[in-house]
Image: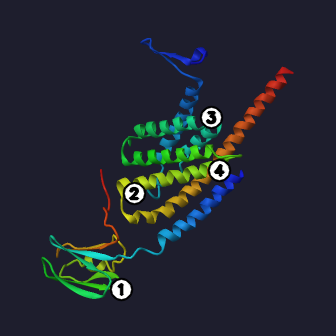
Amino acid sequence: MTRADYYIVLFAALLLPYLYISQWTGDKAGISATIMNGNETTEVSLAHDHTLEIDGALGTSTIKIENGKIRFTASPCLGKQCIHSGWLEHAGEFAACLPNRISVAVLGEAPRFDSINF
Amino acid sequence: MSDDPDSAATTKTGISVTTTPEDHVIAWLAALAIAIHIIESVLPSPLPGVKPGLANVITIAVFILYGWRTAVWVSMLRVLVGSILIGTFLSPTFMLSFSGAIASLIVLWLASRLPGAGLGPIGLCLIAAMAHMFGQFYTAYLLFIPHDGLFKLLPLLMTAAVIFGIISGIIVRSMLQHLEKRKNDTTAQRNKQEE
């Protein structure tokens, strides 16, 4: 192995821990969230704690914001998938109550697509 | 281009194609790389994007033995013909494979410009594997999954690239040692016969 080889191996050995630390810790917390009720969209800030009551297609869903996190706490649907989604805090996380036609998505700095298919 | 009588291939219609010895080297090694590429495409993968990348062993060996230009030919032919034979030509798989190959060729070109002893097989394979991974990762991010969540996969993918890069570097090194030994053996034999 030449000296340059050792530098490359050293570079790789330093790059890997850097990637693990930078990508797997210190998640970008969501700044705000959009709540979609039918076709209506409202944006809420996650900065202060409060509880929202939203009237959907079936009834009232309760959405709670606490410590920069947001979640469904009550919903008139049968499956309760939205409540089981739990706390959402990272940009891009999403919970929806399809029967009540309400969904919550946490936004980061710039909203983007989830995936593009050809 | 050469005076070798075997180098002009004549077809039934009478059209002749003149090939250089370099063309033969490219064709043989590209065929080998394509065979490895296809065999590898059958292997199951734990994560999309993770593959041993053994076809790159050929690219790096060609780069060391014949230079960057030949390595570009072998690598591009491998991606193109391999994808046509598997049936992924112009599909996302092909795009990832193609962009990865381009990225590693760029890095190999830079490596060929290094002063001094430059890089050995292990360094070349490792840096090429990492460049390949970065290239395909950014293509995936820009074209197919522009979601920041994709970056969570990068450490795992890069770990795989580093491990497989070092393994293929070791393979290239023993391959070159083997070739060197055989060359020495044949020249020694020839010298003996001449005596």
Q: Amino acid at mark 2?
A: Tyr
Is label 4 in contact with label 1 (beta carbons under 8 Å)? no
Disc marking residue B122: 4
Q: CA distance from mark 4 to mark 2?
A: 28 Å
Q: Nearer the viewer, residue B73 or B192?
A: B73
Q: Position of residue B81 (x, y in %)?
A: 44, 36
**Residue occupying the point 32% across, 83% down:** A47
Q: Is residue A62 left or right of residue B99?
A: left
Q: Residues within 10 Å of mark 1 (few under 14, many from 20)?
A: few
Q: CA distance from mark 2 to mark 3?
A: 34 Å
Do the residues at pointers 1 and 2 share their chain?
no
**Residue occupying the point 55% across, 27% down:** B23
Q: Position of residue B75 (x, y in %)?
A: 51, 39
- The residue indicated by pointer 3 is B66
Q: Chain of mark 4?
A: B
Say which element carries label 2: helix
What colour-coding does the image apply? Answer: rainbow
Q: Is residue A5 left or right of residue B77?
A: right
- The residue indicated by pointer 2 is B141
Q: Amino acid at mark 1?
A: Asn
User: Earlier along the polypeptide chain: callout 2 or callout 3?
Assistant: 3
**Residue occupying the point 58% across, 57% down:** B163
Q: Amino acid at mark 3?
A: Tyr
Q: Position of residue A49 (x, y in %)?
A: 30, 88
Q: Chain of mark 1?
A: A
- The residue indicated by pointer 1 is A67
**Residue occupying the point 35% across, 70% down:** A109
User: Earlier along the polypeptide chain: callout 3 or callout 4?
Assistant: 3
